[in-house]
Image: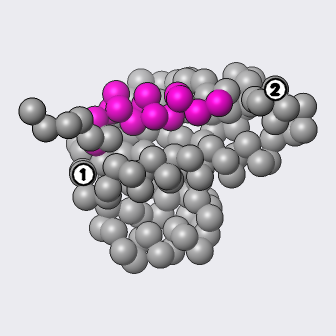
Amino acid sequence: MPRPTLTTLNAVERACLAKAGALRDRPFGAGTLVVKVGGRKGGRIFALIAEDREPPAISLKCEPELSELLRSSYDAVRPGYHLNKRHWITVTLDGSLPDAYLLELIDMSHRLVVAKLGAAARRALQ
């Protein structure tokens, strides 16, 4: 039996929700799962999962230089859909981006967003 990959929505959602302080939300309605950190009301988004696309996709915060490199290296990586294209990428979950790399991108997105939280919110995550 092949090992599960992060191309499944459940696996991607579990990877995002495993991050410290991660909360799921649906402010945009069905079809888009939002994962944020820093509290439900004042929290900041670090992942948006487009569940209603085929194949599904995830948008993540990314360092601008790395996002350019990723877009030129992987067809599955595009500028952030309806997001700041300099700081966000959208990854089509078609299996072409290695799982380990996708996990690193989820980690980076979480880390970048946590760094922008207030000091009290960051302490609460530790």
Q: Main secondary structure of the magenta part?
A: helix
Residue 121 figure quarter: top right
Question: Looking at the picture, which amino acid does disc 1 mark?
Answer: Gly
Q: Judge left or right: residue 98 versus residue 88.
A: left
Against 44, residue 41 (above or below) is above
Residue picked out by circle 1: 95
Q: x%, y% of residue 18?
A: 53, 29
Question: Please, which residue is most extreme toward the left here?
Answer: 1
Neighbour class for label 1 at 10 Å: few (<14), some, many (≥20)?
some
Q: Are marks 2 and 1 in contact (CB under 8 Å)?
A: no
Query: Residue, x 58% and y 59% (percent of image)?
Result: 62
Return the residue nearer the eye: 86 or 118: 118
Q: Quadrant of the C terminus?
A: top right
Q: Is residue 32 visible?
A: no
Give, as a single range, the part of the protein colored magenta.
7-20
Task: For mark 2, give the secondary structure.
Answer: helix
The mark nearer the N terminus, 2 or 1, is 1
Q: Quadrant of the N terminus?
A: top left
Question: Please, which residue is most extreme toward the right here?
Answer: 119
Q: x%, y% of residue 76?
A: 32, 61
Query: Residue, x 43% and y 28% (percent of image)?
Result: 14
96 in magenta: no
Q: How many marks?
A: 2
Residue picked out by circle 2: 124
Measure the alpha-carbon separation of dots 2 and 1. 35 Å
